[in-house]
Image (cartoon, helix red, strand yellow):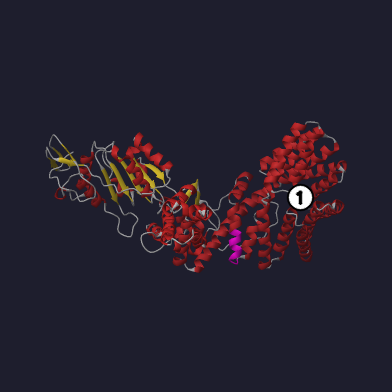
Amino acid sequence: MDQAGTTRNQVSGSVTGTSVQAGIVRGGLHIHQGDVTPVPRQLPAPPRKFTGRLAELELLQAVQHTGQAGGVTVLSGPGGVGKTALALQWAASVQEEFPDGQLFVDLNGFSSTAPTDPGEALGSFLRALGTSPERVPVHLADQVALYRSLTAGKALLVVLDNALSAAQARVLVPASPTSLVVVTSRSKLVGLVGDGARLVEVGPLPAASAYSMLAGVVGDERVAREREHAENLVALCDGLPIAIRVAAARLLMRSKWSVRRVHDELVDERSRLANLSPSGELSVRATFDLSYRMLEPAAATAYRRLSLHPGGDFGPELVSAVLEDPAEADSLLEPLVDANLLDEHAEDRYRYLDLLRLHATQRLESDDPREERVAVLRRIAEWYLAAAMRADEVLTPYRRRLPHTFSSPPRSVPSFGCRDDALGWLERERVNLVAAGRAAFEHGFAELAWHLSDVLWPLFLLRKHYRDRLDVDERGVAAARQWGNEFALADMLKRLGRVSTTARDFEAAERYLAESMELWTRMGDDRGVCDAREYLALLYRETGRAEAALGQFELLVEATTALGATRSVGLNLINLGHVLVELGRAPEAVPHLVRAEEIFRGLGATDPYNHARSVVALAAAQCRTGALVAAAGRAGEGLGLMEALGSDHGRAEAFHVLGEVARRSGRAAEAREHLRAAEEIFRSLGSPQAEAVRERLAELD
């Protein structure tokens, strides 16, 4: 459409024109017949060496060809991730399909200068479309009306770069279904998405594309000579193009440097961000600072303090632990995700990019006093403890526990309605719980560190995790010694003795168990003595001293019966039955195991795991006596119970018994199937029982 008084516009790009056949009035201005409508060409050149982004380019192509979302696409991602490069690369590939021109504006939403005023940007577009400066309306509403008139029916490609908000970008969207708009922003611009825009999230480059980007800048041959260091270098850059460009620039400026040298500069987290933030335009820290400054104070506080989280990802409830006013917690993750300062990588699971975590940590160290940082870290660790204690109480209500006094009442702590929920939460948060215990110990919170070791018992009981268990129990012993609590030390030494036995470190196991028994004896705690002696008897059994183990378990049945510790009686009967079977005295084992099964069945929901253990143990004894039908029924029952409890180790033991029953019944194929299932589970858990099952499979083969 033409415009009175054609004047060369004040924006970059060439201008061409077409004639209009009739005069009309639009936007308060008369458009004269015969005037020429300019065709703006404002797009900057795309990057010379663009790498990757095939998936994002395909999404943009899909929007173009379907006309989806009214032709508006938001490219959203963290600062320095390459949104502008992607937008310009795609725009350059399709610009000829928009004969009425291309418009571009940098809205300065995240920069050191003030964001571009929408009226200023709109005025620039109007002039580019042929409106003389004196005819550009003063008021924004009139500018919008004229812009809609000028763009109606046109096929324009509009790139709105670096938008701060939906409102800033919305007025620049043409009034034409044949036009396309691409908006880049560090925010997700939920207002535009709510209007129907398509959101394309631009994340860090995949490893292969990041490597290709480095090689494209530095040179294929130079990078290929040190491929491993180059791959590790781009990994340290988090796949962020801006960080890769900084690293590449250092290599270009120092032609004699090896890739390894620049890689080694970035290995140390304490200096990584500084080395990626030289003065000038290319600065990772400055890029992140611009996003940070846009946050409201409470969101900025959450961004800084969540960097203290010692594990990987975390759930939304944790935010309450880092704020003085937990009432604000519910509303703070969304703006951080919207600003691409946090990544919601799964439903209700959040994490930092490594470089953003380092940035948040540095902001924390400069903006929060040390005392507050330590207090926040303690609250995070105590939040995990409070939640794990609730899960522990659901899964192992029979355990003896020490109380913990919290520095402040934890808030938003989850509750668990059933065993599956409790065990699922412990498994999901296992890495975080281990890391929280480590952080508590390193910061001198010995009592808290011990509790975070103790509370993981039900997870290790049911899911084993032997490597984590050894690490946690060793730290638990060290924390108990620092704390100076004899009960805590004796209990954790007992646990460490048991896992050391499983790890085949028998000498250390016997030493830990002897010290545990000595402490229990000194405290006059007969139940503690029995518990430690039970683990010592298991050590005897697993080191080939079956007769010594048998004598211990017989004594333990008598001692725990005298104490009225019914559950402990049941445990020792299970162990007594196992040893009798191993000694070839299975008929003697059966009545003990029947009694154990009755005890645990009578305990009901208190200890379903050991009820399942007693059922599987009884099946194994019946198999050895030749009662194969009864053994098969019991083993199948035990398998179902273990599956319901989520105990992989228990499932493997049940499969092992089912395999033995099938083998003794002459069903070799069925035996192999069960034994292979048992071996696979034992092997995945790192259990030494895998070897015995492999030997049985070899005999069958």
Tell me where residue 286 appears, x and y as whole percent: 39, 60
**Residue type indicated by callout 1:** Arg
Work out whether 676 lies above or below 499. Answer: above
Residue 191 visible in the snapshot: no
Quadrant where the N terminus sits is top left
Say whether residue 443 is magenta.
yes
Residue at image coords 76%, 36%: 658
* Residue wearing tag 1: 567
Work out whether 215 lies above or below 523. Answer: above
Q: How many marks?
A: 1
Tell me where residue 313 appears, x and y as whole percent: 53, 52
Q: Which residues are magenta?
A: 436-444
Foreground pick, 9 / 482? 9
Residue at image coords 29%, 37%: 97
Say whether residue 300 is magenta.
no
* Corner quadrant of residue 408: bottom right
Q: Please tell me whether the stretch drawn in magenta is mainly helix, strand or loop.
A: helix
Residue at image coords 79%, 38%: 699
Q: On the rendered structure, is 138 left or right of 168?
A: left
